[in-house]
Image (cartoon, grey):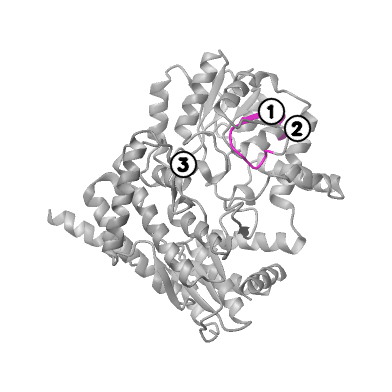
Amino acid sequence: MIKKILKLTATLRALRIVNPVEAGLADFFRRRAKSPAAAKPVLLVQCAEDPFYFGVFGAIASALRLHGPLRVEQLMFRSVNVAEAASWSRFFLNRVFVNAITSEKWRVLYASYCDAVAYRCNDLGDIVGDLFDLVRAYRVWRRLVRGTNVTTLEIGGVLVGDLVNDTYLRFKPAPTVDVADRYMFHVIWQAYRDVRRAQDYFSKRPPQLFLTSYSTYVQHGIPVRIALQHGVKVFAFGNYQEFCKQLTLQDWMHTKFADTYAQDFAVLDSQQERLAEADAALASRIAGKIDSATAYMKQSPYQERESLAVDASGAAVIFLHDFFDSPNVYYDMVFADFWEWACFTIETLQKAGIRFLVKPHPNQIGLSGGVLDELKQRYPGTAFISSNITNKQLVQAGVICAVTAYGTVAHEMAYLGVPSVMCARHPHSSFGFCVTAKTREQYRDALISCGNFGGDQSVMRNESLAFYYMHNLNHAHDEQEFLEVLGVFRSHCADFFELEQVAGLKAELESIFQMSAFRRHVKKFETCLS
């Protein structure tokens, strides 16, 4: 017992540690000139617990302050924790102690350029309000148990069901949604608390501008949607294809808007030069190099490390997603989670007598290994291949179709001459190299017909290049240069305990301040504040 207490004490104490990168960035912002705080305009920044966002939001706030008085407030969004549902004691420990200690650490860091706290998603001071929310959440949860679809749930006129669905998957964590699980009740309760606090803040003292990392999960998405309802300008910084994206009530996903890529590329000049630029970049990725579009991956999925031991000729390939990832990061996802999608796909292909292989996601989290084992036990005899097998190897072996919900693998396979079947409003949806289903029936029909989608490979290749250009390269020269510098800054922020990295980070921030593209973005934010 004493050992457990000592271990717990050490764990909680470790949460307070400020690493050299975090301390260095805070020192950088404290030393910059700080204009007098004003009642207005107000910039709200999400207190993202990540040195990269801490640095980016601080750079923007510091640059805006050079143009006049500005009040900067921080939204402390920490509430749910991964695996907090393992036991009641763990839930209590996380919600009371872990949240409090971690939030205080980051509050102090953000105070290097923030004037005040806007509100806290896990504020324990409003017991009465939280009890009312608990009762409401319990009633909703009981109705869900009786069969209501969680993704359609609204609270106070705010759609939160997709956020609740994805938060459950990520933070339970679980590969599939179980609406009868008590942790679903806790997530719905947190959603009620988040809606009430956000409505109170944005209705009484709305900021002019709100900067957030992501717009998925309840802690990110609910403040975003309520801010938009109150006319606040909101920008998200969570995708790798652009510095930021302005969110709207019509499009509140942080992922890059891609519905008109094909039409937009068709009106560009110098198309052959643009295709050649995309060809060079995509060929480099296929050769095994990490580019800006795959910077989130730990290693390139095209580094050939082992040989393919099964016959893939004439087979379809199911490219699994990370089971704990957000299925609703894109609109119109046909399935509630990736487990349900995988099972439906496997069973449909089996019934149709279509040969297929299953390839795990190359960047999945550790828990996915257990889910894969469960999937193999559920479908014995199914050919699972190693995630180390490259897509180039699969194409060379003769696969005929790729199956993915919304993955970037679609344009990579098209580049290699293979079409895809998909089932969400994904980034490739305006191009012809993929068949996109909007219902389960359409998806089933597309899977059964997957052997008949072969087309002109040169057309598919050009379409994949047009997609790649629009998704990753359609920027002014100075913007592209800025994004590359930002990518380096992001990677350096991840080296938490490299003391020699701190001086370099400060130098990178100084250079970012001088870049024309960054100044252009600051001007845009300044307009939002006026």
Q: Which residue is mark 1?
A: 418
Residue 341 visible (yes or no): yes
If you read the primary sequence from the N terminus, does the residue marked by circle 2 or circle 1 appear first? 1
**Decide: marks 2, 1 in contact (CB < 8 A)?**
yes
**Residue 452 placement: quadrant:** top right
Instruction: Give the dominant element type of the magenta stretch: helix, strand or loop.
Output: loop
Element type at mark 1: loop
Q: Which residue is mark 3?
A: 151
Residue 382, given in percent of the width and then of the height, sits at 48, 19
Instruction: Tell me the distance, in whole angstroms, between the alpha carbons under discs 2 and 3.
Output: 34 Å
Mark nearer the viewer, 2 or 3? 3
Q: Farthest right residue?
A: 270
If you read the primary sequence from the N terminus, does the residue marked by circle 2 or circle 3 appear first? 3
- Specify start and end residues of the magenta stretch as a single range: 415-429
Amino acid type, label 1: Val
48 left or right of 467? left
**Decide: marks 2, 3 in contact (CB < 8 A)?**
no
Neighbor class of circle 3 (other Cα within 10 Å; few <14, some 14-19, many 20+) is some
- The residue located at (45%, 50%) in the rendering is 217
Instruction: Give residue 460's mark.
Output: 2
**Decide: marks 1, 3 in contact (CB < 8 A)?**
no
Residue 276, given in percent of the width and then of the height, sits at 81, 45
Q: Farthest top residue?
A: 353
User: Nearest the camera: 290 or 132?
Assistant: 132
Establish if 48 lies above or below 404. Answer: below
Instruction: Give residue 31's mark.
Output: none
Amino acid type, label 2: Met
390 left or right of 267? left
